Image: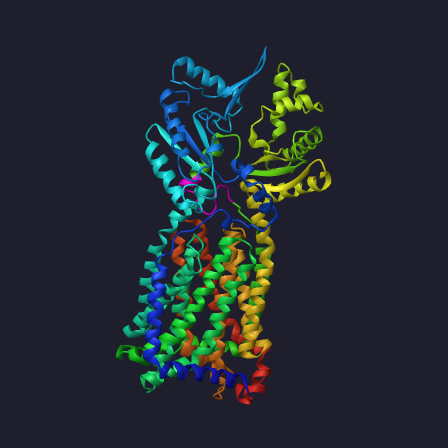
Amino acid sequence: MSQTEESGKVGRFFERILFNNRIAVIVLFAVISVFLGYKAVQLRPDASFQKMVPVTHPFIANYLKYENELRPLGNVLRIAVYNKNGTIYEKEFLETLRQVTDEVFYIPGVDRGNLSSIWTPNVMWRQVTEEGLRMGPVIGQGFEGTPEQMEAVRNNVKQSGRIGSLISNDERSAIILAPLLEVDPDTGEKLSYGLLSQRIEELVRKKYENDKVSIHITGFAKVVGDLIEGSKAIAGFFAITFILTVLLLFAYSRCWKSTLVTIFCCSLAVIWHLGIVSIMGFGLDPYSILVPFLTFAIGVSHAIQNVRTMAAERFHGASKMDSAKATFALLFIPGTVALLADAVGFSTLLVIEIGVIRELAISASVGVAVIIFTKMFLLPVLMSYADVTPMGLRQVAKQEAGDHKVAHLLSRLTEKKVAMGAAVVAAVILGVGMVASSGIKIGDLDPGAPELRPDSRYNQDVKFLVENYSTSADVFVVMVETPEGECGAYPVASTVDRFQWTMENVQGVEGSISLFTVMKQIIAGFNGGNPKWLSVTRDRFISNGAHKNIPTTLYNAKCSMTPVVLFLSDHKAETLERVVAAAQAFADENNSDDAKFILAAGNSGIEAATNIVVEQAQQLMLILVYSIIGVLVWWEFKSFKVMLAIMIPLFITEVLCKVIMVQLNLGIKVATLPVIALGVGIGVDYGIYIYNRLESFLMKGLSFKEAYFETLRSTGVAVALTAVTLALGVFTWAFSAIKFQADMGMLLAFMFLWNMVGAVVLIPALVRLLAFGDLRKRFGPSVGNL
């Protein structure tokens, strides 16, 4: 049995079930829709720290092993309180700082035991005197703001060594460091970054910011909170997309019945998608919240083929029932294969071991799956009742009577010389694109939070901290494991000291701190402040004495791990690559039973792990997406050469997308890597529809050129409208306050449009050059001469 006969048998089987039981089908869909609609309204925002990082990577596994000890160096909020009109040494300002510190202390999710501020007792000053080393809290008990106490605070700040870290270099602002717990202690549930960010804004920024004081907040949790807040505007963008899509579809079909039924089925697909995602236990994060756009746009783009085919069948005299059946029979197999290709493209994102991307992959695959039901099964049944309006039939007549100049021009691509020219131009574009895209980088290429726009409040706060503080917010932590109780021993001290010296000479590392940085200062303090004593010591009595005065954030309770904190100039990909390479090289050469260096924690360590995972996953993802989609195309058309003709335009578009990324200074990262899989998976739809229609005309005995002309005449506008609909569905993201959503929108819009151009122009040319002989063998000499 031939492939066509097999496909026809499958199509007739589903056709009988659907059209012989139309009422039952509609009732079944209604019941399912009510249930899934109820589940959909239960969806809630969900963005946890562990979902945003590659938890299976060794760096993250090492961090999670010591998560409790490293919490003050990991997921931390930095809240800077700035005196616009003076310094921090003013009674009114210090009272405001105290109130802000107390406010933050009581916010659910804050690790109160590790909260740091000049008002907390864990921030100490040290002074070398004739009697020895003296120390105490920067602001002691009973502070009332008298001139004498204010002067004491000024001296204590200078002796604390915190200027540049907790206190700004100009001493006009002070930072509150608030480490966060992953589980909300009040509820026992995962910490909600959206709610945390909202509380910070309402209880701190709005409450205490005025014409005298400004508040600046940075940290991973604030980035995620701002992303969640910015994502709320997505509903508005969806409404705009919805309205524009309705207008576009009506302008094309001139049939209000077809337009309403199509929009209804595609909207139903979105409801089903959200309901199933809710049942699976997923929430909405800044990435997955974009998927309903794709579900709606993909549904409409595929349904356009139904609208055109149904109208054409009615125009040629078929009844509305026969027209609906013919539409189903013609589009069921190619439409299903195209949607399966979409789902495959999405599912390849599962190779990226990052929670939000895997959930995006699953969510998008679910969205495509439900389109198969609502578009392939429900839409034809509803159209068998709705029919096509007289205005819609007049639109078909107008389209049929047109001169089709563009179709005539493009049909010349089936001529050998023209096809060769098109192939040469495509090869040149591909070559230039590969050269231009060779400079694409992995990871972030901009300072601050690249997920947000440069002028966002968050990035302005980052800019404030960079300009006013010496210690960077980009922290890379290397953990040093030792035998229990030996974290302060000389063999460890000596090795860590050499490690710090090595790393401080790496470009991009601005400074470092470890247990032994503080220990050397304390030992010198015990010895009259003599700089000769500013070194590690072999004497355990001296080191143990100093150890008692070192903050516990620099070693764990068993004294079996001590972190080395590296302050980086930025978290750009090149900086992280240098730091990781240097740290790993030192570890490989110097690891021993006394001290084992393991990477990595801190926000930059986590970023480095993410970059590594993305770099490792991108090639595998591309191999999988092209391989699996290629197999589906081959299965549909049973021709390797035809498969190449359909796939090559997709590869050219992928390369050109990377060129645009280079020009826009975008790296391959969590936010941009999915674009390629989505673009390729959805882009193959054009080729499947075009070639399927082309074959149907070849079966009728038309020549290759005539068949392609008829393909363009009958479905060319529908294919172009498909691309425009898809591009429109994502281009509205470009106006999002969230930069990565805007970037994804622009890149996807380009890929959707360019894939359509590539399919219309290159597929006939490549089929003429690669598979024309096979067409003659299959369809006979009517195809044309070689």
- The colour scheme is rainbow
Taking the image as shown, residue 19 lies to the left or right of residue 649, namely: left
Q: Position of residue 336 (x, y in %)?
A: 46, 74
- Regarding residue 737, the answer to whether it shows in the image is no
**Residue toward you, 582 or 725:** 582
**Residue toward you, 97 or 674:** 97
Quadrant into which the C terminus falls: bottom right
- Say how many tags the image has: 0
In this picture, which residue range is highlighted in magenta? 446-459
**Residue toward you, 252 or 611:** 611
Residue 300 in the magenta stretch? The answer is no
Q: Quadrant of residue 284?
A: bottom left
Q: Position of residue 27 (x, y in %)?
A: 32, 74
Q: Position of residue 588 (x, y in %)?
A: 71, 42
Quadrant into which the N terminus falls: bottom right
Taking the image as shown, residue 415 lies to the left or right of residue 105, namely: right
Q: Position of residue 560 (x, y in %)?
A: 64, 35
Q: Is residue 671 above or below residue 423?
A: above
The single residue placed furthest to the top in the displayed view is: 130
Q: Residue at x 52, y 30 (%)?
A: 470
Q: Quadrant of residue 18?
A: bottom left
- Regarding residue 180, the answer to whether it shows in the image is yes
Considering the whole magenta stretch, tell me its main secondary structure. loop
